[in-house]
Image: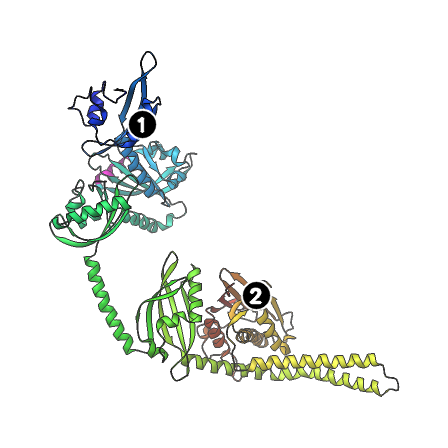
Amino acid sequence: MFDTNMCYIASSHYYRNALGVAGLKLEGRCHYDVFPDLPGAWKEVDRRVLAGETLSAEADPFVRADGGISYWQWKMRPWHHPDGRIGGAVLCNRDITTSVEKQAQMQRMSDALDAAQFGICIVEAASGTVSYANAAFAQLHGYSPGEIAGLPVLHLDRPEDRAHMRAHFTDADARGHTVFEAQRVRRDGSMFPGLVSITAIKPGPGGQAYRIGTVLDISESQTNRAALRAKDVLFRTYIEDAPVAVTVADATGALIAANPAAEAMMRSKPGALLGLTVADMHFPENHAAVLDDLATLMKDGHLLREYRMRRMDGTGFAAILSARRMADGTSLGFLQDIDKLRQAEAAHMAVAHDLEALVAMGPAVVLYRARVTASGATVLSQHGDTIRLTGSGLSTADLLRHAETAEMLGSVLVCDDRQEAVCDITVQDDDGACRWVRNRIRVICRRGSHADIVGYLSDVTRDKLEQQRLQRVATLVTLGEMATGMAHELNQPLASISFAGQNAGLQLQRPTPDLAIVTAKLDKVVAEARRASLLLEHMKIFGRNERKPVEPVAWKAALKGALDILSPRLRYFAVRDEIPDAMPAVMGAPVLMEQVLINLIGNAMDAYDATDPGGGPGARVITVAAEALGSSVALRVSDHAGGIPVSAMARLFEPFFTTKPTGKGTGLGLALCFGTITEMGGTVAAHNEGGGAVFDIRVPAAPV
């Protein structure tokens, strides 16, 4: 109780003991003289109360005389003289430090466990009640987290199983951990089988014992018990055997928690680190720097430092400390012993040196590691000589900035599901000759807005030239096979032109020719001539050796071009076009994509000729279908002509391998299909289905 000058009129023993001034006589002394460091906020409270307000707080921090922090629940109001004048203030307070610290501890535990995908609960060992349950645990048992908290944990078991459950508790307390299967009871009375794990946590100084329980619903996976136990072992590994040491310190730097890895790193007995300060874990000459770092941590909220630390047996070791200040004023620290890491780095450098020497002895290849961001790719390390690979002064960074590679890396960066990619780069060496360099990459990790990749650059010039030669040969073979049919196809417009021309001439010889008939016949001549010209032009384009750069091409357009080439044979077959009009385009060369379809459809035609030579179009059906699958387009060509021999499946895409009779086919068609689709960054595969062969092609969709 205070007067208007905040001098003590009366005070209780509880008040004096709680504030650490039990030995002082307070009556008559000014409150501000007793506590000279009282914050301005408290003085403002006194001023407002003496002005007539009544104020209170549920949990206010207060720095005691001994430097410790306690939390108070208080209420302060003015008292009045009989005439109504304010005579002073009355302060009622209660120390709730223990309750606040317990609540903060439970909040930390709740934050750490709420994200778990399986049921986790914390049970007070003394009372056997649930003090915490994550959402997964509550949902498994048909409760909300708020409803299940405070329930006796044995209420979640069948009555006949509760004695066994108590035995498991005893076993966990004795051995530290136990795992077993039990029938769990939901709120509605239904049951489910669960894999239960109980870990007994012994109390620290001044704490209480509790148990951590986990529950996995094994209703649908009882036959896979090994995998479930593996998950439980993994969970316990993270909790008990984490390779990184974890410590928790209060605002003064005193340790209030340390996991087994921290005790092992410091060569300490269990529990012996609790109460020590962070300075005790360092050599005396480093104490001042460590205390400065602790002040920085309390100010900035985070800290990352490398130290030479001292174990409890006096030995030293190098360590990296990553620490973060928590909301309650404690700091969470992660320690990593880097002595072994440095040894591993030295071994890595030796391996890298050996790898460099090995790459130098082998063919012209470059192995590299790079980081890809929206602004481009940065080379982190490489093995091999780019000049030797390209025959020019181009570096690995230059090749990564090349248009083809930049486009590939951009697509990898925005597609989370794309882990591998390949592209071919065209370069010129110092002699002016053209070379092709293949860049094959694999994503090793993704972090936010960047991705780390490893890449392999190799010279594929010889393979490219050979593939071009094979494509030319296959094209000429295809044209040769179609020459006879094409001659028959051209005879029709030529005959029509001749007949229309003769009719027009006869009409003009009449004394009064009908010019409308002459005009119609001449229009017929022009139309048939244009038809023959377009057919020949398409054949000429198809037969050229030149290849245009890749561009967005629709499979539907490629199919139309292929069917134009195959038109002499189409009257004997039915080709079903099941490609939707809105199908996304893919990046490719139109002529090569037409050749892929010509080869696949032509093979199906040959298969029908071999198995059903007299069949008509209704029985000889070839289906070409496509569908969009995320960031790629799938194409399927199928028939019902008997399928592919099982003995030929393994060699189907080898050059010069064929199952056709001698003189029929070159064995290049499917090999070139495979090469073309692979160059487009896609895949091609074959299997038998429904009495016929099915070829499945999948290539990336063109950027929108």
Q: Which is the main secondary structure of the residues drawn in magenta?
A: helix
- Image: 289 above or below 560: above
**Residue at point 21% right, 30% down?**
36
* Residue 490 locus on image (x, y percent): 67, 83
Give the number of the mark in front: 2 or 1.
Answer: 1
* Residue 405 locus on image (x, y percent): 42, 69
**Residue at point 32% right, 71% down?**
367
Left-right relation of 543 to 293: right
The answer to which of marks 2 and 1 sits earlier in the sequence is 1
Q: Amino acid at mark 1?
A: Val
Q: Which mark is residue 522?
A: none
Q: Which residue is mark 1?
A: 45
Q: Of helix, strand and loop, which one carries label 1?
A: helix
Q: Residues within 10 Å of mark 2 (few under 14, many from 20)?
A: some
* Residue 507 locus on image (x, y percent): 83, 85
The N terminus appears in which quarter of the rendering? Answer: top left
Q: Which residue is mark 2?
A: 625
- Looking at the image, do the residues carrying marks 2 and 1 touch, with CB atoms under 8 Å apart? no
Q: Amino acid at mark 2?
A: Ala
**Number of numbered callouts drawn:** 2
Q: Residues within 10 Å of mark 1 (few under 14, many from 20)?
A: some
**Seen from this angle, which residue lies furthest top?**
82
Decide which of 115, 84 is in the foreground and name it.
Answer: 84
Looking at the rendering, the stretch of residues picked out in magenta corresponds to 165-174
- On the question of residue 675 being in view, the answer is yes
Q: Is 451 part of what is drawn in magenta?
A: no
**Seen from this angle, which residue lies furthest right?**
511
Quarter residue 479 falls in? bottom right
